[in-house]
Amino acid sequence: MPPEYVPEIATLLAEAKAGRRQIYASTLMIAEVRPSWLKSKSYDNFQDFVADFEGALNLIGPTPTILMQAARLRGHSYHRTPKQAGEKNRVMSGMDAVHLATCLHIRDVLGISDIEFHTFDDGKGKNYEERAVSLLNFQDFSVHVANDPDVATLCKLPRIKPSHPAPQLDL
């Protein structure tokens, strides 16, 4: 996480703990945090880190419907349109697909119509398969498969970097 976002994310989490904001997340996000990353932070152990989010997040576990949608999203190769010379296709990682399908489930099944998917993922990283598709700019990499219903609904989902709507000012 870029350090400049830490204060805004901390504010969002504090508001969620106080009941002034709802934050939803896939339970699989816990598996994406490596305990070794926390050694330099203020957590004595991984359980303390997870407990710190208790009450702040509405965690949604993967259901067969979520996992099937994630698999369908992963079933495509993605690239910019028009495809640039020498550009290789990109893939969607399994975890990214589950997080996105979970967000769509929250919106469509739980009825949270104003949900936004918060991510820093702009496709600059590489997973074990090959280069990953940008989540922030997914629509730019999916034009050639935009008629797929899962892809079309994902393109309409707001995907933004985490930010607080009214950041605190340093006075």
Image (tube, rainbow, N blue to C red):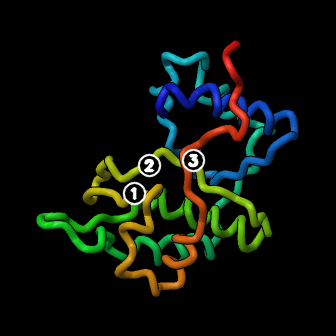
> Are the two marked residues, 1 and 3, in contact with CB atoms closer than 8 angstroms?
no
- Kindly identify the amino acid type of the residue bearing the numbered disc 3: Met
Specify which label sits upstream in the sequence, 2 or 1. Answer: 2
Specify which label sits upstream in the sequence, 3 or 2. Answer: 3
Question: In this rendering, is residue 66 above or below 26?
Answer: below
Label 3 CA crowd tier, 10 Å (few <14, some 14–19, many 20+): few
The quadrant where residue 146 appears: bottom left
Q: Would residue 94 appear left or right of 83 to someone viewing this image?
A: right
Q: Position of residue 112 (x, y in %)?
A: 77, 64
Q: Would residue 123 appear left or right of 136 to someone viewing this image?
A: left
Alpha-carbon span between mark 1 and mark 3: 18 Å
Q: Residue furthest left?
A: 86
Residue sitting at x 36%, y 76%: 76
Question: In this rendering, is residue 170 above or below 118?
Answer: above
> Are the two marked residues, 3 and 2, in contact with CB atoms closer than 8 angstroms?
no
Mark 1 highlights which residue? 134
> Are the two marked residues, 2 and 1, in contact with CB atoms closer than 8 angstroms?
yes
Mark 2 secondary-structure assignment:
loop
- Kindly identify the amino acid type of the residue bearing the numbered disc 1: Ser
Question: In this rendering, is residue 33 above or below 45?
Answer: below
Mark 3 highlights which residue? 29
- Kindly identify the amino acid type of the residue bearing the numbered disc 2: Asp
Residue sitting at x 70%, y 59%: 115
Residue 121: give its label: 2
Mark 1 secondary-structure assignment:
loop
Label 2 CA crowd tier, 10 Å (few <14, some 14–19, many 20+): some
